[in-house]
Amino acid sequence: MAQHVCPVWIGYFLASPIRRLFENPEKILGPYVKEGMKVLDVGSAMGFFSLPLAELVGLTGMVICVDLQEKMLKSLEKRALKKGLRDRLKTRVCGQNNLGLDDLANSIDFALASAVVHEVPDAAAFFADIYAALKPGANFLVAEPKGHVTSKEFEKTVSIAEQAGFIAENIHVQGRSRIVLLNK
Ligand SMILES: C[S@@+](CC[C@H](N)C(=O)[O-])C[C@H]1O[C@@H](n2cnc3c(N)ncnc32)[C@H](O)[C@@H]1O
């Protein structure tokens, strides 16, 4: 069955700076992302997290933003250009069941999927794709909105991630999100 996918008009709200008041990207990502890292923002939409990630990785790092919807990525590219961050960011349109990351095998230092997994039809394939792209020992932070995803559904997500090979290190609730830190 086709999953509900976040419409582009909601993408504008998700990228609003007001969201920073209750979800601070630097606070959430700062402990994991360092200068020079190559990071993946899966389901990036218009870049609420991608632009702070680009700041965190600095001039020598790179953020690869993957999304199903080209319109989201076009808007993200414009925002990155305005902030002088375009050179630190690559965008890729993916398929619903294939993230198209084969060329990145074992090369990613950190990955993020915020409010994405509940929209993905095949979570097992999704986690397998990201597992293959990460370097051994790298972290993958998964956040899901409490309002859309029950604790039972989130447990199921964590168990699918574990079946893909991840070790779930820290499952918790922070603000409006259920969060798990996965380690390869
Ligand atoms: C609710 S938005 C979250 C956007 C962003 N991560 C954030 O936290 O603001 C979900 C995004 O995931 C994308 N998406 C949905 N299904 C996807 C899939 N199977 N593969 C990659 N991206 C997907 C949607 O196009 C949308 O941009």
Image (cartoon, rainbow, N blue to C red):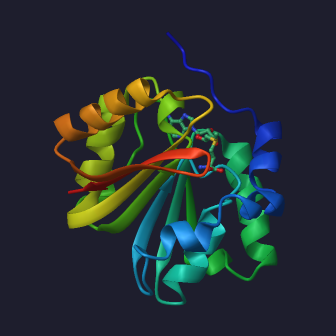
Question: How far from the left and from the top, in percent, is residue 123?
Answer: 37, 30
Q: Is residue 18 left or right of residue 20?
A: right
Identify the image quadrant of the C terminus: bottom left
Q: Is residue 88 left or right of residue 73?
A: left
Please identify the quarter of the rendering in which residue 27 is found: bottom right
Q: Is residue 123 left or right of residue 56?
A: left
Question: How far from the left and from the top, in percent, is residue 66?
Answer: 53, 51
Please identify the quarter of the rendering in which residue 25 is found: bottom right
- In this rendering, the answer to whether 155 lies above or below 18 is above
- In this rendering, the answer to whether 172 lies above or below 136 is above
- What residue sits 73% from the left and 63% below the top? 20
Question: How far from the left and from the top, in percent, is residue 116?
Answer: 53, 39
Question: How far from the left and from the top, in percent, is residue 49?
Answer: 61, 62
Q: Nearer the viewer, residue 88 or 49?
A: 49
**Which residue, as the protein is rendered here, is positioned at the far top?**
1
- What residue sits 68% from the left and 33% below the top? 6
Q: Quadrant of ligand 1?
A: top right
- In this rendering, the answer to whether 160 lies above or below 92 is above
Q: Is residue 10 left or right of residue 40?
A: right
Please identify the quarter of the rendering in which residue 115 is found: top right
- What residue sits 81% from the left and 63% below the top? 17
